[in-house]
Every structure is written in C-alpha cells, then in structure tokens.
Amino acid sequence: MAAKKLSETFSKNLMVELQKWGRMKRTGVSLRYMMKFGSKPTEKNLLISAQFLHKELAIRIARRALELEKLPYGLSEKPAVLKVRDWYLDSFRDVRSFQGIKDSNDELAFTKTIKTIKLRHKHVAPTMALGVQQLKKDLDSKTKTQDLIEIHQFLDRFFMSRIGIRMLIGQHVALHDPNPQPDCIGFIHTRMSPMEVARNASEDARSICLREYGSAPDVNIYGDPNFTFPYVPPHLHLMVFELVKNSLRAVQERYMDSDQVAPPIRIIVADGIEDVTIKISDEGGGIPRRGLQKLFTYLYSTAKNPLDENLNFGSPDAVTMAGYGCGLPICRLYARYFGGDLQVISMEGYVREEASRSKLGTILRGQALTQTDGGANLNLAQMVGLGPLGLRFDELEPRLRRSSAPTNPRLAEEVYMSLGLGIVGVKELLNLAPSPYKVRKLIQDLGL
C-alpha cells in the first residue's frame, strides 16, 4: 500500500500551521546563555525559557517533519521513516496545543509536555537507521552508498537538529530538579571528569560485548583522575561508548578463535595546555583504506547481520555491538555540536586507535593530534574534538574592539559568562588558557 502524504493523514489546519512554522527562522542558543539562565533557575527565568521553547521547538520540529516528507530515493515512504514523521507531527501538535505560556502553571504544564516529547523521540535514531536499511534493500546493487549525497546531507541535518532539540528540552527540564547534582547547571557539568565518564561508558560497552560474545577484552584507562572541565556528560558518554564498542568488537572478532589472550583496549585521557585528548587504542586489525570513506556514511555498516525490523528498540537486546550503521556519523555530529570534530585514521593489519579531543574551558582551540604508543604502528585513530563552551578569543576580540568602553557592564557580563568565571574560577581559567597573559589583561581591562 502506498504511503500516505501528510495532507492525506492530518487535518488541513495542522498542515497550514506546519508550513507556517517551518518557514520561520530558528534561533541558535549557545551554552553560555544556557549557563547564564541555568545558574539562577528562578520562576521568572524558567518562564522565559519556556516561552522561548514554545516558539523555538515548533519551528525546529516543523522543519524536520516537512523535510521527512520530501526525501529522495523513496526514503520518505519507508515504514520506519513514516513512523518517525508521525512522531514529529504529534510533537508539533503537542507544542502548538499551548496558546501561550503566561504564568508558572502554564510553564509547569508545558514542561511536562516537552518531557513527554523527549521520551517519544527516544528511539528516533535507531528507527531512522532501520528506515535507511529498508532503503538499502531497494537500491540498485551498483549504487555506491557514499554517492547518495542528498541522503547523507539530510541525515546530518536531521540528527544535528535532533541533538539540538534534545539539548534544549533536557536543559529546561533538568533545571526543575529539586536536588541538582553538585557543579551542574541543568545538563551542563561545570567540573566533568572525563576519566569517570570514560570508565562508565567503557563498562557499559563491555557489558554489551559480554552479552553478545560471552567474553570481552579488558579496558585500561590512564590519566589524571582529578582533572575536570565543563561539558555535557551524556554527550561524551555516548561518543566514548560507541568508540569503545567498535574497538571491543574488532578485538573480540580478531582473537575469538585464537589461542592468544585478547589484548586490552587502552584509553588515555591527556589534559594538555590547550586540548584534552581522549585516545582509545586497540589491536583489532584496522580497516582497509578503501573502507575509510564509507565510515561516515549512514548506509554503511561493518556488521554482518542487519537490524531486525521487528526489534523492540526499548528492550535491552536493542543495544547491539553493531548493525545500525550510524554510530560513527552521529558521534561526529555530537562532537561538532560544540565545535569539535571526529577524525579517523587507519593502518590496516595491526593496531587500532580511537581518540577523543576535548577543548578546555571556554576559549581554547586547536587541532587534534594523533600519536602512536611507544612507536607502535597506528592502525585506526578516531579523533573526537569536543568544542568550547562560549566565546573563543577570535570571537571575543572583535567585540572588544567595537566597544568604546571596555568596562561597559553588559559587555563585562557577557565576557564574564563566556570565560566561565565563577564556574571554573579565575585561577583555573588562567591555568587552562592558551595565553594566560591575554586572559589576565582581559580581566584587568574589563574590571573583572
């Protein structure tokens, strides 16, 4: 049976609303402003936040729903994609069911609604992956998946938008927590320990490996356990989990029929002056060079068995070692969401390395560097750069030049928040900065 168009499934009034909001321009939100609002979650600030989300979520959700209707190669008609489209339509209708957010009662009701929306969209990623798999079955065998540029560009936009929507909802909802965790402003942890996140993510990945293979290589983590920096722990957890899972599967499958003991996965957290690098290395055999260009395409997976179309994504069995074909592309989007990136380098046949680079504080910037351990051959390096929180120097200096009075209170407040002062502390900031002299001079000039 042919898939029904939106206009055939939903009311005319809803379609008019969808088109109207889909044409509106979305508003970017920086972590700086999230932290500014979140540092004082007063009733007034929560009301302002809800009023903003009431409009912004409608725009973002409408755009995605409309785009899901117009995908090339028949992807829009795949059952899994239709399911996702309907989730977005339902969520748009839920958001627009509120005429306005006028008081705290409205704000609380709206917050309850967007919590439901976030839960509804929990399985969007694997469901879209299933839709892509359904498309692959219908493609000509001669079609190269990496050549389907329109599909890849759409999925990049779609998943990046999803990250943003979930971040906005999650931040607002978290601000209602009556017992927030220490050093947390909503979703944002101002003193996140990458060692702790890496340890938890590795344990989760090993549990999946144990379930599927009956055994799992050890994971050894090296670094300063006292080192912290501001970031969003669930984002880092997801990236490390996916990368470690890749390494575990590569090593396990290479050594499962061998008399040799599977070598451990190594995670190194290096807190440099300008960058944090989380390197995940293994001896899983690597990837042929011809396969590298496919790694970040959504229609490619190294898994032998595709996803089960009848799989319940809410069940524990839905978390598999491989098969979705979107782990690396989505990891890269999470890294890029805050200005970072994910890079892969492979030397086939020996060691496999995966690394995550995190930028410190609010102003640090740099390129990820891949290094070998003790001169060992580098096999695969996945470099994840986690972007800075707030303004960088290259964004800050033009603002200072335009200001006739550096001690302008509004500018001072903006710079104060962008530098994270009072969150990571002046002393810590000076130690983390690429140029302590510049920061000291800036603080003096602004009277901070």
Image: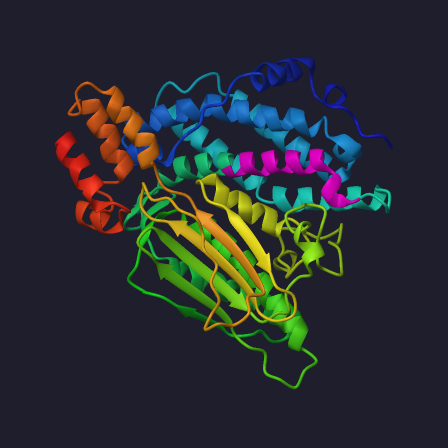
Quadrant containing the C terminus is top left
Residue 93 is at least partly visible in this image: yes
Where residue 160 sits: x, y (%)?
55, 37
Q: Residue furthest bottom?
A: 259
Residue sitting at 33 percent across and 44 percent down?
364
| Apparent side of residue 305 relative to residue 155 in the rendered image (left or right) | right
Where residue 345 sits: x, y (%)?
57, 57
Residue sitting at 52 percent across and 60 percent down?
354
| Apparent side of residue 104 relative to residue 210 in the rendered image (left or right) | left
Where residue 251 sits: x, y (%)?
61, 71
- In the image, is residue 313 above or below residue 413? below
Q: Residue furthest front?
A: 375
Where residue 348 sits: x, y (%)?
65, 65
Q: Is residue 148 magenta?
A: yes
Quadrant containing the N terminus is top right
| Apparent side of residue 238 relative to residue 138 in the rendered image (left or right) | left
Q: Main secondary structure of the magenta part?
A: helix
Q: Colour scheme of this structure image?
A: rainbow
What is the number of callouts on the image? 0
**Magenta-tinted stretch:** 144-163
- From the viewer's side, name the closer residue of 1 and 33: 33
- From the viewer's side, name the closer residue of 243 and 117: 243
- In the image, is residue 130 above or below residue 261? above
- In the image, is residue 435 above or below residue 106? below
Residue 104 is at least partly visible in this image: no
Residue sitting at 73 percent across and 30 percent down?
71
- Quarter occupied by residue 445: top left
